[in-house]
Image (cartoon, rainbow, N blue to C red):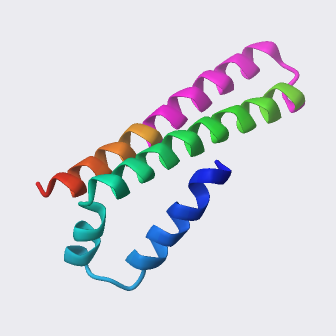
Amino acid sequence: MILLIVPAIIIVMKILGSNQATSSQILGNPAVAVIMILFIIASCWHMKIGMQVVLEDYIHNEKLKLALIIGNHFFCWSVGLASIYAIIKLSSGV
């Protein structure tokens, strides 16, 4: 994550305040799209693991814990796939 956060912040700073056409042009660069997709994957994985540790530490009912861990897993996958889809759609120009 440390290696991906710096380029991701630079890309987001370039996009801030720009219109959709400019944002699409910036994200249309294949290198930028790959960096953002890798950042999304790493962030979602980090989010999933972090929340799972919190759930395992503070939820004592085993059935509830299992349900919440499954929900956390589903949520992280949903956010990750939707974000990757958005980046691919913007970078492809469709």
Horizontal side of 89 relative to 55 (left or right) equals: left
Q: Position of residue 72 (x, y in %)?
A: 61, 31
The quadrant of the picture occupied by the C terminus is bottom left
Identify the residue shown where x is 23% and y is 57%: 90
Relative to the observer, which residue lies in front, 70 or 11?
A: 11
Q: Is residue 46 left or right of residue 58?
A: left
Does 47 appear above or below 90?
above
Tell me which corner region of the image, top left, top right, bottom left or bottom right, holds residue 28. Answer: bottom left
Provide residue 25's location: percent of width, then percent of height.
Answer: 22, 69
Residue sitting nearer the eye, 78 or 62: 78
- Looking at the image, which residue is at 26% across and 81% down? 19
Residue nearer the viewer, 18 or 30:
30
| Front in this rendered view, residue 78 or 4 | 4
Extreme residue toward the top, this view: 63
Q: Identify the main secondary structure in magenta.
A: helix
Vertical placement of 12 versus 55: above or below?
below
- Image location of residue 15, percent across then percent down: 38, 75
Above-or-below relation of 60 to 9: above
Residue lying furthest bottom: 17
Residue drawn at 51 percent across, 61 percent down: 8
Q: Relative to 61, is 24 on the left or the right?
A: left
* Residue at 23% over, 67% down: 24
Q: Which residues are magenta?
A: 58-79
| Figure disc tally | 0
**Residue 28 painted magenta:** no
Asked whether residue 65 is drawn in magenta, I would say yes
- Image position, residue 49 (x, y; %): 70, 32
**Image quarter of residue 65:** top right
